[in-house]
Image (cartoon, grey):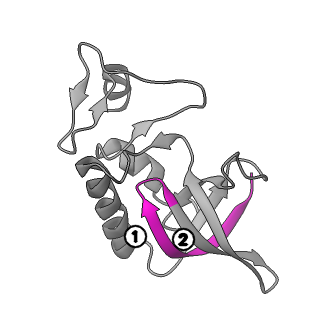
Amino acid sequence: MYEYTAAVRKVHDGDTMTLDVDLGLETHRTPVIIRLNGINAPELSTTAGKASLAFVNDWLSTNAHGSLSIVTAKDKHEKYGRYLAGVYNFPGGICLNNVLVEQGFAVPYMVGVFWRPKDGDQVRPTGLHIPAEYIDGHG
């Protein structure tokens, strides 16, 4: 895992964005496409996807103040060419990935694990289903 400072160039949807990443020593890499690690936001073609995108843009304008801190999950990109990362409003600050899940704009995601709604699951205002075991364990 590595931590970098970054500036947002474009938000594609609720869990993907393009950044200008400061690698240190006056070295930048741009564009860098990241996927928010550990979450899955709805597709942009859906109403919930549009709501997720709007939430991310609003959160960034309110919390990022021009730059972010990102923590990569690994030092190589995944199969679609994106880097997996946690996005924070400042080093050690609030994690956007977690906020998206807590506010119902994304669901937890792990590679190879597909979640389907079942009895006891709740539906958030965005229309996303949140697993009961996640709600029970995370408020």
Q: Residue furthest right?
A: 25
**Vertical arrangement, residue 79 with respect to residue 87, above or below:** above
> Which badge, 2 or 1, comes first in the chain's sequence?
1
Disc 2 to disc 1: CB gap under 8 Å: yes
**Vertical arrangement, residue 21 with respect to residue 138, above or below:** below
The residue under the point 37% across, 21% down is 116
Q: Which of 71 and 118 is in front in this view?
A: 118
For the residue marked with disc 1, what is the amino acid? Leu
Q: Where is residue 117 in the image (x, y as percent from the top left)?
A: 31, 21
Q: Position of residue 44 (x, y in %)?
A: 36, 54
The crowd level at tag 1 (other Cα within 10 Å; few <14, some 14-19, many 20+) is: some
User: What label sits on residue 60 in the rendered view?
Assistant: 1
Q: Is the magenta stretch mostly helix, strand or loop?
A: strand
For the residue marked with disc 2, what is the amino acid? Leu
Q: Which residue lies furthest to the front in this view?
A: 45
- Separation (CA) of disc 2 from disc 1: 9 Å
How many numbered badges does the structure rendering display? Answer: 2
User: What label sits on residue 68 in the rendered view?
Assistant: 2
Left or right of residue 55: residue 71:
right
The residue under the point 49% across, 73% down is 10
**Vertical arrangement, residue 5 with respect to residue 125, above or below:** below
Secondary element at image label 1: helix
Q: What stretch is highlighted in magenta?
A: 1-16
Q: Nearer the viewer, residue 2 or 49?
A: 49
**Magenta run includes residue 5:** yes
Q: Which of 136 and 81 is in front in this view?
A: 81
**Magenta run includes residue 88:** no
The crowd level at tag 2 (other Cα within 10 Å; few <14, some 14-19, many 20+) is: many
